[in-house]
Amino acid sequence: MPRSSTYEVVLDASLFTPDRLQPTAVGRLAFQAGTRWLRDHVCGHRTLVSEHRVGFVLWAWQLEYDQPLRFHDADEARVEVRARVRGPRASQLEMEMTVSGPAGVAVRTRAASVPLRLTGDQALSGAPTTLPDSFVAGFHDDEVERSPYLSPVRGLLGAFEREGERIASHTTTFRVHRHHCEVADQWYWVESLGFAGGAREECVLRHGGSAPELRRALAEGIRRVDATWLRAGQLWDLLRVRTTAYRHGGDLAFVHELGLADDGGSGGDSGDSGDSGDSSEGFDGGPYAIVVERV
């Protein structure tokens, strides 16, 4: 049976919106949970980076809300996390986490990371690699899956364009400051979820009058997030988040494409974008990340 790490986390008001755990809070809990599983069962994160010169870059992440968990529901929640190696050449590390409250599982997450062979510099630079045999040897047979994880993000974008209806589009800019970064002065991936959430709220505030159904995103909150990261933002980058809202069946979806903006002026809202176009349009080298939020 795959091994798990299970523990309690004390809840505080900063983790919540009025009716659920914040997506960024869930992301932080998930990153901590994955790090804890590695420490408990295979190798600590610091040792992996410092001694084995192996790092991980998050490539895909899912968040799904299940049963209610609000600030007033409990003093603590139970976190359970499991991990496995994926891919025919051990090219991915997958982590699955649940956070449970009195009503049962409140959120589920799945993260797929790809390994890097680190060069040893302060920036934690590296090149893509497969997981070392010595690392894979720490996993049980039922913790190794030969098929790779496939992100649903591109498929969702195609379905929205083919079958959905665009409701609104908006562009917002954010600066990556040091409090958004991890130790190597690259953005901490969780913060990009915050940039996407902020862009969604700006879109609703700007267009909610002409398209009232957008207000559901504020009244009901997000029920699912699917994201993929293609490259990392760096300290002091000016990012442009291009948001497109779609009606797709009975769902309301927001697609956020995060990329490097032209840093010719100050940050802040840069106004409307008339069309989201192709995912690489308007970004030098394509988007850094794509975040899909569904209401």
Image: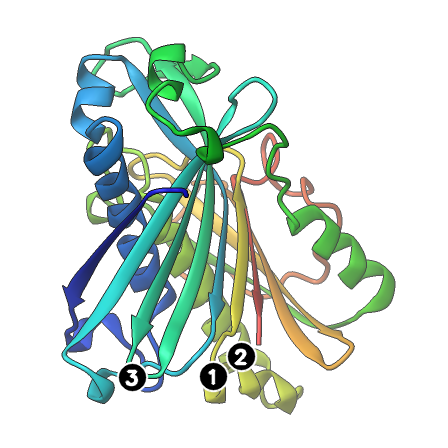
Give the amino acid at mark 1.
Answer: Leu
Residue at the image point whose x is 19% and y is 29% from the top: 44
Q: Nearer the viewer, mark 2 or mark 3?
A: 3
Q: Quadrant of residue 25?
A: bottom left
Task: Calculate the distance from the C-alpha at mark 2 to the C-alpha at mark 1.
Answer: 8 Å
Residue at the image point whose x is 43% and y is 40% from the top: 263
For the question of whether residue 16 can be seen, the reply is yes
Residue 108: x percent and y percent? 44, 62
Give the amino acid at mark 3.
Answer: Arg
Identify the residue position indicated by label 2 in the image.
204
Q: Residues within 10 Å of mark 3 (few under 14, many from 20)?
A: some
The vertical placement of 48 against 93, above or below, is above
The quarter of the image holding the C terminus is: bottom right
For the question of whether residue 269 can be seen, the reply is no
Q: Which of the pair 9/215 is nearer the observer?
A: 9
Q: Residues within 10 Å of mark 2 (few under 14, many from 20)?
A: many
Identify the residue position indicated by label 3 in the image.
70
Kindly check if marks 2 and 1 are in contact, taking CB atoms under 8 A apart as contact.
Answer: yes
Q: Quadrant of residue 78?
A: bottom left
| SS category of the residue bearing label 2 | helix
Please report whichever mark, 2 or 3, sits nearer to the chain's N-terminal start. 3
Identify the residue position indicated by label 1 in the image.
218
| SS category of the residue bearing label 3 | loop
Residue 99: x percent and y percent? 32, 65
Residue, far right: 162
Task: Calculate the distance from the C-alpha at mark 2 to the C-alpha at mark 3.
Answer: 24 Å
Give the amino acid at mark 2.
Answer: Val
